[in-house]
Amino acid sequence: MTGQDETQLVPGILDEETVGLLWSRTYNTDGKPDWSHIYPYYHPEVVFQDSIQRIEGKAEFMALCARLTERCKELRMDVHSVAKRDGVIFLEWTMTMMFGKWPSTPVYGSTVLRLHEDGRIISQRDYYDLWGDIFNGIPRFHQIYRRFMRKRFG
């Protein structure tokens, strides 16, 4: 930061249309995401959590995004729907990732953003079945995985 109060950096209110546009534009730039335009919407004490990790703090969240960008040869997100109610924003999406020589892999999921009283994102929780979606792209193995999941949890 350059000494400015972070609340002055928030470009506007996060509504359904703004979130849909911001997230769509984030991922669809030459296969490499650029999150810089959404960082001002995040509170310094944001908590991010998904199926594999929990990150606390905006600097740690930004580092997580940088690592994901480095690992992926290509990363896209298609936002299908956005809804907002009482300081909570819900997104439904498909993220397509390509790592090195492997074919692209679609991951289907949703995100819940909770807003701080100042309007910035204080928590982000991403929900998806990472292994199920990745294993769907592996011939024969996806059938074994799905059969195991049905027997074990279905």
Image: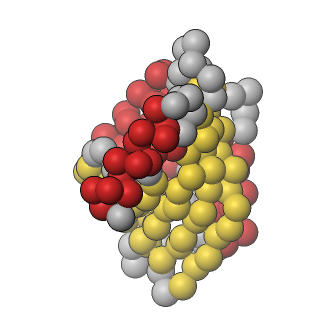
125 lies left or right of 56: right
Picture layout, residue 74 above or below residue 56: above
Q: Residue at x 43, y 58 (%)?
A: 127
Picture layout, residue 142 above or below residue 90: above
Task: Say if residue 128 shows up in the picture.
Answer: yes
Choose between 77 and 132: the one closer to the eye.
132
Residue 95, image quadrant: top right
Task: Say if residue 44 shows up in the picture.
Answer: no
Q: How is the image coloured?
A: secondary structure
Provide residue 82's location: percent of width, then percent of height.
Answer: 64, 70
Residue 14, image quadrant: bottom right
Q: Residue at x 68, y 67 (%)?
A: 81
Q: Residue at x 63, y 29 (%)?
A: 104
Provide residue 70's location: percent of width, then percent of height.
Answer: 48, 21
Provide residue 150's location: percent of width, then percent of height.
Answer: 38, 57
137 lies left or right of 119: right
